[in-house]
Amino acid sequence: MPKVVDHEERRADLGAAVWRLASREGLEAVTMRAVATEAGWSTGALHHYFSDKEELLLFAFRTVADRMGRRLAAATEEAAGPLELLARLLEEGLPLDAERRAEVRVWFAFLGLALTRPVLARTQRLTYRAWRSRIADTLRDAQALGEVAADADPEGEAAALIALVDGLAVQATFEPRAVSAERQLELLHERLDALASRR
Amino acid sequence: MPKVVDHEERRADLGAAVWRLASREGLEAVTMRAVATEAGWSTGALHHYFSDKEELLLFAFRTVADRMGRRLAAATEEAAGPLELLARLLEEGLPLDAERRAEVRVWFAFLGLALTRPVLARTQRLTYRAWRSRIADTLRDAQALGEVAADADPEGEAAALIALVDGLAVQATFEPRAVSAERQLELLHERLDALASRR
């Protein structure tokens, strides 16, 4: 079925164009016209893949979520135990290098737009819910091994850990010097160490 | 000088119109034309006060910052000691009631727009810096009274506490049921209690 392959390839090309545009100029710059220009397509051809700006925004957000998802899957393979996995899962949300800095910018721009767009807000909600339950499950695994106190509340701790990561990402995005990559890791690991030592 | 009084009154009227519009329809809806309509003015008259949309956005953000600032000043008057003040300073950033929910929405919308607008990013940066140093100073006062461990790093703890508040605000905004006001307070106070018990 060569036509299907072609379609998937063209979608991947478009995805790359949306991502280049979003990380270079911000999510506000992601319009049907701009994406068509960036990809070297006509706006008409683009309409076969996306019907409006909102679909493009969702696509850009999912691109970030997919990139993170692939790294989380690798972390799950590689981690020696639940505490190491917990650290890796959370570090993936911090803007520690150029790749994650670009992702975090798209993420926060999406958040701002989702405030007034129910479809985007729903995607945002589901993504956080999945991330939170992933963290909570890992905490439960750590509890089962006696690596985290049995009386810690996995759901609450997961919400607080994700909150810390998101909030550090906000400060690091606008003040990369005051909240350096080193500082972000130090503050996250301090919190994880406190969780581990309370058992 | 009646002319000055009049000018200040008109600015306050405009401020109220910008705030109504921003909290009702989001920061995206704050345009010169929409604000003029909301205030019952002509766009021409509005131009005597604001030259463009960016100035309106800054004004909306400063309105939030001023509202928070007034509550922080009240908290400073009322708090019995630095630990109580610390809790009050941080709780003001959580979307615990309708007023703060509206403020948090404007705050995050501004954050999204600031990613690509240097003037807004600068304001954002200065506001966080001021909030962080306020929290760090209060932590130092608590340390001087022996209420917080002498070896805690006030700057790092301040960044982590503000990050927790910001991140909880994100989750609470999109998932008000999963991250209720009660849950937000519980997670913040757990962190503050841990700080106080480590002395």
Image (cartoon, coloured by chain):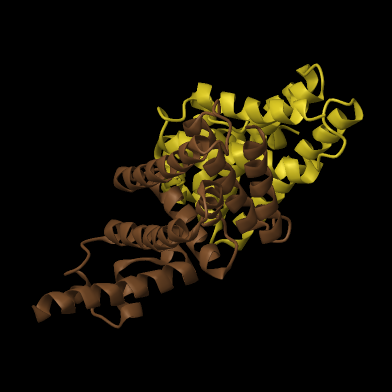
Chain colours: A brown, B yellow
Residue B1 in sight: yes
Q: Residue B67: give x, y in percent of width and height.
A: 63, 31
Split into 4 quadrants, where in the image is the C terminus of chain A? top right
> Looking at the rendering, which quadrant does residue B154 occupy?
top right
Name the residue rendered at 37%, 66% in the picture. A30
Residue B72 in sight: no
Query: Residue A99 or B121: which is nearer the viewer?
Result: A99
Query: Residue B54 or B136: which is nearer the viewer?
Result: B136
Residue A66 position (above or below residue B140):
below
The single residue placed furthest to the left in the displayed view is: A1
Name the residue rendered at 71%, 32% in the picture. B2
Q: How many marks?
A: 0
Residue B30 position (above or below residue A25):
above
The single residue placed furthest to the bottom in the displayed view is: A40
Q: Residue B17: give x, y in percent of width and height.
A: 50, 35
Name the residue rendered at 34%, 45% in the picture. A117
Query: Residue B46 or B175: which is nearer the viewer?
Result: B175
Name the residue rendered at 63%, 59% in the picture. B119
**In this rendering, would A48 be left or right of B161?**
left
Q: Residue A18: give x, y in percent of width and height.
A: 36, 70
Q: Residue A176: give x, y in percent of width and height.
A: 67, 60
**In this rendering, would A39 be left or right of B9?**
left
Split into 4 quadrants, where in the image is the N terminus of chain A? bottom left
The single residue placed furthest to the right in the displayed view is: B144
Residue A43 position (above or below residue B22):
below
